[in-house]
Image (spheres, rainbow, N blue to C red):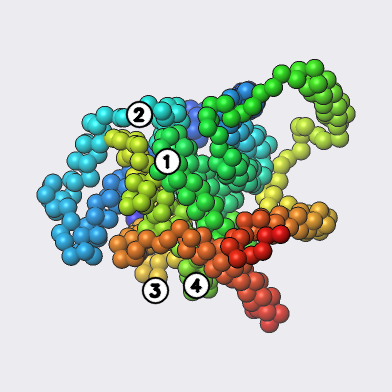
Amino acid sequence: MENLFTNLAGSLRAALESTGLPAILTDTSMTMVKLTAILVFILLNALWLVYMERKVAGYIQFRPGPNRVGPKGLLQTTADIGKLMSKEVVIPKQADKVLFLLAPALVFAPPLMVFAVVPFGENMAAIDMNIGLFYFLAVASLSTVIFWMAGWSSNNKYSLLGGMRVVAQMVSYELPLVLSILGVVMITGTLNISEIVRSQQGIWFIFAQPLAFLIFFIAGVAECNRAPFDLAEGESELVAGPFTEYSGMGFAMFFLAEYASALVISFMCAILFLGGWLAPFGMTFIPGWIWMFLKVYLVMFLIMWIRWTYPRIRVDQLMGFGWKVLVPLSLANIFVTGLVMKIFKMLGW
Amino acid sequence: MVSLSAAAFWLLALTILGAALLVVMSKNIVHSVLWLIVVFLGIAGVFLMLGAKFLAAIQILVYAGAVCIMVVFGVMLTQREDMSKSNIFNKRMLTAAPVVGLLLVVSGTLAFKSVDKAPVNGGSVPTNTVEAIGELLLSKYVVPFEVAAILLLVALIGAVFLSMEVKPDADND
């Protein structure tokens, strides 16, 4: 069980090699298969997460949530997707048509690209990159401009305001996100994601770096524009911000991309701070990839819990919190981490 | 393999040059910024082909992710009535042509002269460049590194000062 997926990949590779294909074709088709598997994984999870979110919201607000379509309302999201697909795509007359249509097509790309380096278990990363963590930060930073593209090209004042808010918020919260990871990088001395997980054998970094975890989690929630940081959408003030003018599948793409980036943040939390695929209390009879999945869903549930129990914060509070609380705290975390490491070295640990 | 990487290189080069031309030619400054992002991503691709993964990631994070966002802020703060004429053109060919020509000649000769100083092919690329870059930055190039840091700090303080709220009861003389 532990090596189910690695064995599958290995036998597929062996089958391809036995057909006498050139090495480069084998590698390319293996990568394609892995990336397709990741795409299917993300889409299935996004489908499930939309349903889970509505159920969680239902229980928190003391109502049943979706329960009509299919058993326990499980087919609700499928029905919604069907509805969205059959809807007309409305393009505003004054919109920048190319950019308007390009934005929802591109918005899914950054989270998908990040998943290329995410290890789903031991040796289960599609591409085990040396600088995986840095790649995650670089690619994730590309989402900002796509949201802004959507907001600007709609040629609508609410969209433009929402787009500007997205840019301001994502740029501000990227700083604490990066700085909080630095503590982990300092301890492990590597940017390779799998190596970071392996160095948590002794202690999970949530215990060694609790402050960094908190900052990373908050900044991560802000990065994927989820409540209480969903000022960019702000239904009651900005009528969904950058997405105001989108209808049908265009809107659905933004919706799915939001869940995909929330999934990315959950995976990163699990990998960097919760020990990734490592089993707690030596419970290794459950395979590593299931542990990984459980941890990811724990973080995901936490994100949903916060969304449905906290009110949205004000835009000036958002900026003040990012720049005056999170950034100084993460800098202090780096300083303390360096100091403690130096002391430990002097003590000869 | 060689032909494949050559094809990739020419594809990237074409993308970069085409997008760079479009940056200059677009009448709408927002389109210029977006094409600029394509240029930066293409350059990151060239870095990747050279085996410099860290530099490629830096290129995406700093240039495509941050610098272009700053341009976006600039665009938004200076918005015009008609965005389709926001990238202004003029007709000063007579002054522009010699300056551009001179620039081309100078950079061309410099590039030509440095061919034998920087080996274009041969030699294996180290797989882990991060440590080497970090060590160089904090030993050999520590002074430029610190100067750049101070420059950014000054810019930061300047920006904070400029955007400080003016109190209504402050004496404006």
Give the distance between the C-alpha atoms of the residues marked 2 and 4, in whole angstroms: 47 Å
Q: Is A147 on the left-hand or right-hand side of A85? A: right
Could you tell me the amino acid type at mark 3? Phe
Whichever of labels 4 and 3 marks the residue nearer the N terminus, that label is 4
Query: Which element carries disc 2, helix, strand or loop?
Result: loop
Residue with the mark numbered 2: A91
Mark 1 and mark 2 residues within 8 Å of each other at the beta carbon: no
Mark 3 lies on residue: A281
What x and y, as percent, mark residue A116?
A: 48, 45
> Whole-percent x and y of residue A193?
53, 55
For marks 3 and 2, the one nearer the N-term is: 2
Dot 1, how many residues are within 10 Å of its Cα: few (below 14), some (14-19), or many (20+)? some
Amino acid found under the numbered disc labelled 2: Ile
Residue type at mark 4: give it. Pro
Q: Is residue A31 left or right of residue A308?
A: right
Left or right placement of residue A54 versus residue A174 in this view = left
Q: Earlier in the sequence, mark 1 or mark 2?
A: 2
Neighbours of disc 3 within 10 Å: few (<14), some (14-19), many (20+): few
The answer to whether marks 1 and 3 sit on the same chain is yes
Tell me residue A312's x, y (percent).
37, 60
